[in-house]
Image (cartoon, rainbow, N blue to C red):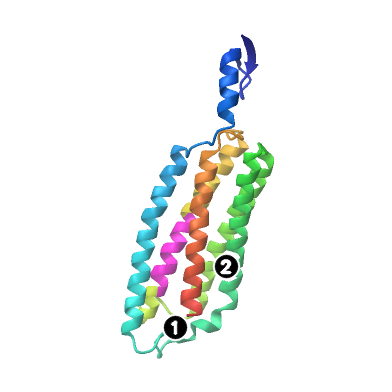
């Protein structure tokens, strides 16, 4: 029997037999933690939610004669393509920085994880500010016809999800700054990254659908 030190500095009694068993188990594949599994189930429900919104959008679009409809500024939506393209690029980059945070903490690099998380949060906030600015420049509102209503509903709900993701990653950053994550215990970071990747993928579909198709 020998003494080992835990992550928090407290002594821990480890027997030779238990150490061997732990070492053997350490080479096995780790199962999904509860936070990750819960997030995967939540994402499935979110897929159905956005699927319903997309279905409603296509239904309205098929029934309309011209899309976007002529008669208001919504018809000029494709002339505003540059700014949302930049926002899309920022969101894609944020997905990469979020994954880098996961890779870093898997290696036990807390500082690298915190830096990547901070950059991800900043990019997410910039995206939200940029989306609000774009709303002020479009020239049409939620009450301006079918296209206006569907545009703001789709992008608005997505923006709410981005805000949720930013808050989630902000909590991870706060906990990471306190040293609460390690190479073995970082399920919340993994779960939050899955949600952030989902939000990014949804936006790519929305962006292509609203501005190009």
Q: Does the magenta segment cover residue 160?
A: yes
Is any part of residue 14 visible from this angle?
A: no
Find disc 2 in the rendering and name its residue: 88
Residue 177 % position (x, y): 62, 38
Residue 167 % position (x, y): 50, 49
The quarter of the image holding the N terminus is top right
78 shown above or below 98: below
Helix, strand or loop under label 2:
helix
For the point 36% across and 67% down, the residue is 53
- What's the CA distance linking mark 1 and mark 2? 20 Å
Q: Is residue 142 left or right of residue 104?
A: left
Q: Does the magenta segment cover residue 203?
A: no
Is any part of residue 7 visible from this angle?
A: yes
Q: Are marks 1 and 2 in contact (CB under 8 Å)?
A: no
Residue 37 % position (x, y): 43, 43
20 shown above or below 168: above
Find disc 1 in the rendering and name its residue: 74
Circle 2 packing at 10 Å, graded few (<14), some (14-19), many (20+), is some
The answer to which quarter of the image holds residue 151 is bottom left
Q: Is residue 40 left or right of residue 90?
A: left
Number of the front mark, 1 or 2 = 2
> Disc number at residue 197?
none
Q: Earlier in the sequence, mark 1 or mark 2?
A: 1
The answer to which quarter of the image holds residue 186 is top right
Helix, strand or loop under label 1:
helix
Q: Nearer the viewer, residue 58 or 28?
A: 28
56 shown above or below 179: below
Q: Nearer the viewer, residue 112 or 183?
A: 183
Stretch of the chain drawn in magenta: 151-163
Q: Is residue 114 left or right of residue 66?
A: right
């Amino acid at each position: 029997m020998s003494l080992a030190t835990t992550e928090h500095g407290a002594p821990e009694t480890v027997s030779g037999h238990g150490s061997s068993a732990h070492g053997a188990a350490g080479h096995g594949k780790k199962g999904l933690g509860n936070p990750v599994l819960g997030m995967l189930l939540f994402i499935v429900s979110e897929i159905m939610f956005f699927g319903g919104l997309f279905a409603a959008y296509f239904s309205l679009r098929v029934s309309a004669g011209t899309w976007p409809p002529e008669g208001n500024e919504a018809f000029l939506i494709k002339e505003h393509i540059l700014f949302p393209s930049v926002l899309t690029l920022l969101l894609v980059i944020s997905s990469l920085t979020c994954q880098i945070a996961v890779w870093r903490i898997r290696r036990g690099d807390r500082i690298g994880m915190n830096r990547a998380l901070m950059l991800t949060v900043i990019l997410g906030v910039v995206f939200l500010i940029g989306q609000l600015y774009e709303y002020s420049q479009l020239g049409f509102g939620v009450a301006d016809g079918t296209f206006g209503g569907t545009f703001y509903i789709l992008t608005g709900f997505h923006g709410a999800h981005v805000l949720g993701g930013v808050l989630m990653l902000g909590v991870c950053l706060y906990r990471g700054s306190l040293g609460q994550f390690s190479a073995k215990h970082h399920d919340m970071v993994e779960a939050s990254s899955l949600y952030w990747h989902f939000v990014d993928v949804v936006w790519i579909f929305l962006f292509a659908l609203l501005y190009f198709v």
